[in-house]
Image (tube, rainbow, N blue to C red):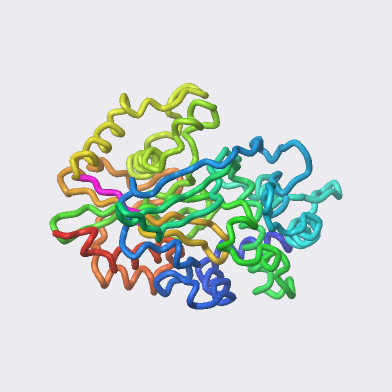
Amino acid sequence: MTDTAEWWQVRAYLQKHRHELSASAAARYPAADRAEGTTLLTTPSWLPAAPLPLDAVQLSQLTPVTAAPGGGTSGRTALDGAGPGRAGPGRATPDAAAWDAAVAAVLPGRADGSHYRRYSAAVAGLAAPAIFEDRRTYRLASAELAGTNPAGPRGSLAFERGTFFQGYDVGAAVAHEHAAAVLGVLDREDLRALVGDPRDLARRPANLAISTLTLRADGAAATFPLHWRDPAKVGHAGGLYQVVPVGIFQAADDGPASQAQDFDLWRGMMREFAEELLGTPEDYGPAGTAVDYRAWPFARQLTGARDDGAVRPWVLGLGVDPLTLATDLLTAVVIDAPVFDELFGAMVSSNAEGRIRPGLAFTAETVGRLTTREPMQAAGAALLRLAWRHRAILLPG
């Protein structure tokens, strides 16, 4: 256990130096494991040879695991957020006791002499950002994006049921530990060693974020918006630039109706487009009531444009942030200029997570600058470079 002042010192350093810490964390892994020369960790089976149409990626849901928001489960398992493993037959997960002992080194004590057991509890008690809640998620269990069949390239993603804090409690603790090691507060990184290969989805809870590069296409030329994530508003990647929109793959709410119908990448992406680019509130109706996507004008218009070919969603890959272990599906949505202007003419300049920079030119100069000289989140940097490499497919002109 660390004292509160030291915890704050390390956390402040982590918040201020996330970009540099991501680079130093990436240096612990082979360069061959990184996507497009960025710090994002990936593997050949996660990188299709060419962009996949979104509907070429098949989703499956494994036998659901009951896990209530807030970390409650029936019995003491790694599913309660205290450790990186996943319950289930055949899972090679770290020892829970070893994790508890190691994580204690990065958690502060309370004034009453007790100590926090989870990183999310410490953040909630001492440094909660504006958006910080334990929502249910679809937790990534396995991924294959470089497969083929007689019909052409295909991808598959398999999920279990999870919650946001289950993934956060592992990734945020590992990131804090790395910052403490860089500062000399700790002399080794036991949590990172327990996690092992960050790409091994069987060894830790992995919430999937869908990161989308939004390209306004005018022939072969394009522009895109960029997001600066305000550290006062978000619990992850504060102070970094990122593509927009980005959101955790989860239902609109925790009700069973939403959980069933929102197991769909496109529906999650549409909600993020509305929330991050148009400032739409996340409250889509009475609690427990599923979103009516056919009646929602924005979703109906965006999906109709997709059906007409004026909106083209693609999957470019999958990767893991070396610092926080955040796992991102890398997507690009190409929108013809007239449709983009109609849908996003009222784009906001700021939202609940930060500020929006609109209209950046999708050029070699811009991509090079953002991915080498700006504090860009690992997933965003890899996505920009992949999109530039595949620009002839994304923007045939």
Determine the residue positioned at 40% across, 63% down.
Answer: 47
Q: Residue 394 at what x, y percent from top left?
A: 24, 58
- Horizontally, residue 215 falls left or right of residue 83, namely left
Vertical placement of residue 339 versus 369, above or below: above
Q: Nearer the viewer, residue 130 or 52?
A: 52
Of all residues shown, which one is farthest toward the front? 150
**Secondary structure mostly taken by the magenta-highlighted segment of the chain:** strand
Image quarter in which the C terminus is found: bottom left
Magenta span contains residue 375? no
Vertical placement of residue 359 versus 65, above or below: below
Q: Which residues are magenta?
A: 310-315
Q: Residue 287 at what x, y percent from top left?
A: 51, 24
Q: Residue 346 at what x, y percent from top left?
A: 26, 40
Determine the residue positioned at 48% across, 67% down.
Answer: 43
Q: Is residue 357 visible?
A: no
Q: Residue 68 at what x, y percent from top left?
A: 66, 35
- Horizontally, residue 270 falls left or right of residue 391, namely right
- Horizontally, residue 270 falls left or right of residue 326, namely left
Determine the residue positioned at 44% across, 59% down.
Answer: 318
- Horizontally, residue 237 falls left or right of residue 13, namely left
Determine the residue positioned at 40% across, 61% down.
Answer: 146
Residue 91: image quadrant is bottom right
Vertical placement of residue 365 versus 48, above or below: below
